[in-house]
Image (spheres, rainbow, N blue to C red):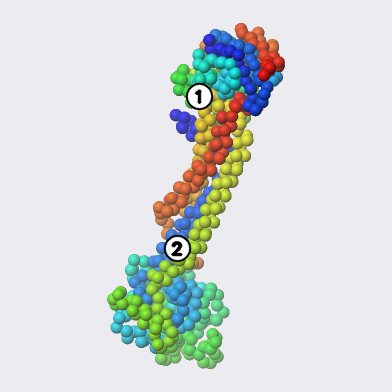
Amino acid sequence: MKLSLALSLAMASLWHRRRILLLVTLTLTLSVSLLLGVQYLRTEVRQSFNSAVSGTDLIIGARSGELNLLLYSVFHIGHATNNLGWNSFQELQKDGRIDWLIPLSLGDSYRGHRVVGTDSRFLEHYQYGDDQPLQLAKGRWFSDVFDVVLGAQVARTLGHRTGDEIVLSHGGGRTSFVKHDQHPFRVSGILAATGTPVDRGVYVSLEGLEAIHIGWEAGVPAPGRTLSADAARNRELTPDTITAALTGIKRQILTFQVQRDINQYGGEPLSAILPGVALAQLWQVLEQFELLLLGITTFVVVISLAGLVTVLLTLQTHRHQEIAVLRANGASPSLIGSLYLLECTGLAVTATVLATGLWYLLLLAVAPWLLDVWGIAINLRRLTVAEGLLLASVPLAGLAVGAIPAFKAWQLGNRASGWGAQ
Amino acid sequence: MIIKTTNLGWQWPGQSAQLRFPDISLPAGEHLFIHGPSGSGKTTLLSLLSGLNRATLGSIRVHGQDLARLSGGGRDRLRADRTGVIFQQFNLVPYLSALDNATLPCRLSGRRRQQAGDPAVAARQLMTALGLPGETFNRKAPELSTGQQQRVAAARALIGAPPLILADEPTSALDVVNRDRFVALLLEQAAGTGSSVVFVSHDPALASHFGNHLELLTDTEANP
């Protein structure tokens, strides 16, 4: 009975002071949604990165760092420092331990999207998520030199259909001043959405990439030396170099052996990396930053809670009269103290609930943008246990800091001059 | 006897001066008027009778119970169950309506609730009898005039028929007409519930309403 009284008094008191408390609750709400957001994104980004490539045993490129190779070959982040000779690639094809190889040639772009030179093996062997293969949503894989297949997101955001003609730009980046406008490509197919960087890619044949660069010197077309589309089709278009290759090994147990052999390859300096290991390395690097970020947001929540207690303590100076009235009517000092505990916890619970709602609203609004700009697929999902615990800790912290004004109120109710509010 | 004190004294913590009070013997159902100038310890005496403070000297029995033997919680319960209190001012919990303020004792004490029957009905009856218009029942304390606030406080003190009502200069903020009406209404309702009223005031004009009188003097300070 006393608890229900304390609850109803606390609710009435909070409602009475709602205008003042609104602002601190808002501050707390924002900080809690920030905290939840950081934790949520942490989980999602990992999920998104981990599902980007699967079934690939080794990634091979010119000698460079593991992370660099992983990032530019799979995630289209950063650039290759050097190329992989076509001869080396052909040597690798002869290796009996290797099941399949996907050549990747990067360097050009289409309206901010990376152009990936490859061949039909990409469609055949590339896997993502839980070993899911790629599928064409529309049309077919490229067969002509000037055919192009678009990732789902490229087609969606730029509104392309099969049969459209597009002009690639030389070099990466969102804006490019040098365009391959002599050689437009025809959209032959569109890939089904995967929620991975594949969606942001533009896929052409290795020959196509070779053809549009004939007669180019130092990144610009040399006048009179470029070829028309038809002339190019009749040329020998085997590339000299590619950027990287994805590899499947016949027997998993041989993976390390193949990796070692490639790393010691005599023809040119090469690197072969295990995508899983490189990702783990990436998380190892990022974890420090993640924890730092989580730590900072935790402090923001703590600061908001401190603000809340400051406001409650300030309001307390106006509540002597109320405490005296309650005491005179037989309320115990603990009941008075519990009012403050309940009020502080109540505000923290309110802020937590609001923050969760706010976060999901924000997610609805921001997720498409994140996918668009960063290619990070953020799913609307239920909260994980870790996120739930993190959220539950906020009202608990509210209860803990509420003990400060509660103790002061208890003292006030207990002290000798308990009569009236004079 | 509803109140029986002997050699009652009070010393503020950390001070050597001591307040001494004349002995009181008040039979149940009778009223007592305590008069005295400022600083004579009127409010202190009420805080001792209510059990909010513990006497430093002498013995004090209220409702037949020796307050010195009761714990803080025991005195709180005794007050909740059996004593109504009216302050000089600021009587109401500001975020509760007049009605919720008046029924507050019924929520703090099962006994008062039982005696009141339906607390909301009892509170409405008392507030109406004390001359409060019906539209004020749902107003919050800051929206009520001082006189209205004091009547709500009186209704709260009376609800659930506590045997004792302690009133600390409840009329000091009222004009003469309202003052006399308030005292008359309070005593009339107290007679209805059979409650004893201990009424403290510095205004001797009110003494005629009461059967028993106690005069506190400024020199009630005894030699240490």
For residue B55, which quarter of the picture?
top right
Check disc 2 and report the residue beneath it.
A45
Residue drawn at 62 percent across, 39 percent down: A314
**Is disc 1 placed on a helix, strand or loop?**
loop
Q: Amino acid at mark 1?
A: Ser
> Residue A147: percent from the left, percent from the top?
41, 80
Q: Quadrant for the C terminus of chain A, please.
A: top right
- Between residue A164 and residue A60, name the one nearer to us: A60
> Residue A253: percent from the left, percent from the top?
30, 75
Above or below, A99 against B145 in this view is: below
Check disc 1 and report the residue beneath it.
B71
**Is disc 2 placed on a helix, strand or loop?**
helix
Q: Amino acid at mark 2?
A: Val
- Between residue A150 and residue B20, name the one nearer to us: B20
- Between residue B172 and residue A415, name the one nearer to us: A415
- On residue A367, the disc is none
> Residue B11: percent from the left, percent from the top?
63, 22
| A259 left or right of B103 in image | left
> Residue A244: percent from the left, percent from the top?
42, 80
User: Chain under label 2?
Assistant: A
Residue A330 in view in this figure = yes
